Image (spheres, rainbow, N blue to C red):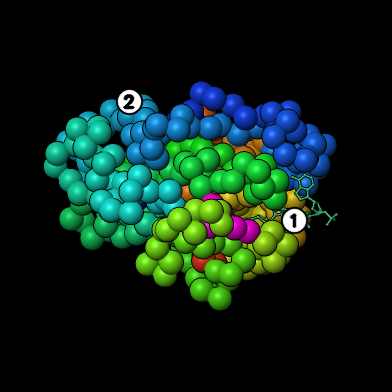
Amino acid sequence: MSKLRAAIKGVGAFVPEKVLTNADLEKMVDTSDEWITSRTGIKERHICPPDKPTSYMAAKAVEDLMQKSGLTPDDIDVLICATVTPDTVFPDTANTILHTINAKNGFGFDINAACSGFLYALTVGSKFIETGTYNNVVVVGADKMSSIIDYTDRATCIIFGDGAGAVLLGSTTSGNGVIDSILRGDGAGREFLHMKAGGSAKPANHETVDNKEHFVYQDGKPVFKAAVNGMISTVNEVLERNGLSTKDLDWLVPHQANMRIISSVGDTLDIPKEKIMINIHKYGNTTAGTLPLCLNDYEKQLKKGDKVVLTAFGGGFTWGSVYLIWDY
Ligand code: UT7
């Protein structure tokens, strides 16, 4: 019997019905389907109704997870929600999700690590399981990016979309499950990707609204470069630490920020495209939602014993890689 580890026992997801295509964006800003497709690989993204918050999508993803896995709301011990678009500054979104799904026996909290949020939350959630004190931990990645995007800024509005994914963590002694995690952060990167106002550093006022300081600001080029380097280095590091090479991997699950970033990471690591989960064309960059949305889309192709590395990079900067062995 191997040591007690956390394993993913189920996956659920939700994306809103409304689709924003590249053709739609051509009518909104000075861009083209050709530019967006060739520079990012994105064809369309889903947009949440203005009156529905992030917790709405997250609760739907958790309900999908519960329906597929047989989990009931009262089985949930801990719910961790990774998001940069919480419903409100406080209370946290995880609490609202638990209330929405009528879960009464657990507690929850949010993690803000931008596009790496799901990796951070997955790692933290795994530790709860490894203590042996908690049986069912739900890890959600959810973002309503449309609520913080300036749809007159062609540099950002073409990239992001809305969506949510959730996984259930339970315990296993099979030798499978979450094996290792390497997470990194460097606050020096915050100048390249951030929201200027709305926090304690610059509270909202008329001027911040007039200056459009409540939207995502991104200087794309340095972020692109750091994303490629950060993902490659932590994938290599987590594999080496576990005596593996990229040839041993069955799946790479990369954050879906830009198809060119994904290709560059895959090519450098010499991982064939068939082993890389890709759905950026359908959803764009859903920030904390990309990794669980990938797991959900590829769930039927995953087999027990598959060696999987998830990797992400995002605002902060934050980045990292998690190595796990699929357990169902
Ligand atoms: O998920 C969190 C982490 N985020 C990322 O990983 C994102 C990383 N960055 C990127 O994915 C890319 O940098 C972008 C997709 C954001 C931008 O692509 P790029 O190849 O770096 O383009 P650029 O910003 O250097 O712009 C190249 C040209 C510029 O025109 P000039 O100055 O060469 O005349 C831009 O004005 O493309 C122009 N441009 C556009 N043209 C048509 C920028 N956005 C658009 C647009 N449509 N939407």
Q: Quadrant of the N terminus?
A: bottom left
Residue that mark 2 sits on:
67
Residue that mark 1 sits on:
264
**Mark 1 vs 2, N-terminal side:** 2
Q: Which residue is found at the position 77% from the left and 40% from the top? A: 30
| Residue segment shown in magenta | 213-218
Amino acid beneath label 2: Gln
Q: Is mark 2 within 8 Å of ligand 1?
A: no
Q: Which residue is found at the position 39% from the left and 32% from the top? A: 52
The alpha-carbon separation of the residues under discs 1 and 2 comes to 37 Å
Per the image, is 217 magenta?
yes
Q: Which residue is found at the position 58% from the left and 62% from the top? A: 193
Q: Which of 256 and 144 lies nearest the eye of the viewer?
A: 144
Q: Which of 142 and 122 lies nearest the eye of the viewer?
A: 142
Residue 41 drawn at (x, y percent) = 73, 41
Per the image, is 297 magenta?
no
Q: Which of 300 and 154 lies nearest the eye of the viewer?
A: 154
Outermost residue, left side: 105
**Relative to 86, is 151 on the left or the right?**
right
Report the disc number at residue 221: none
Residue 200 vertical placement versus 86 (above, below): below
Residue 312 drawn at (x, y percent) = 56, 56
Q: Quadrant of the C terminus?
A: top left
Q: Which residue is found at the position 51% from the left and 66% from the top? A: 316
Residue 229 drawn at (x, y percent) = 67, 67
**Relative to 7, is 312 on the left or the right?**
right
Secondary structure of the residue carrying numbered label 1: helix
Residue 170, located in which quarter of the rendered image? top left
Q: Which of 157 and 75 lies nearest the eye of the viewer?
A: 157
Amino acid beneath label 1: Ser
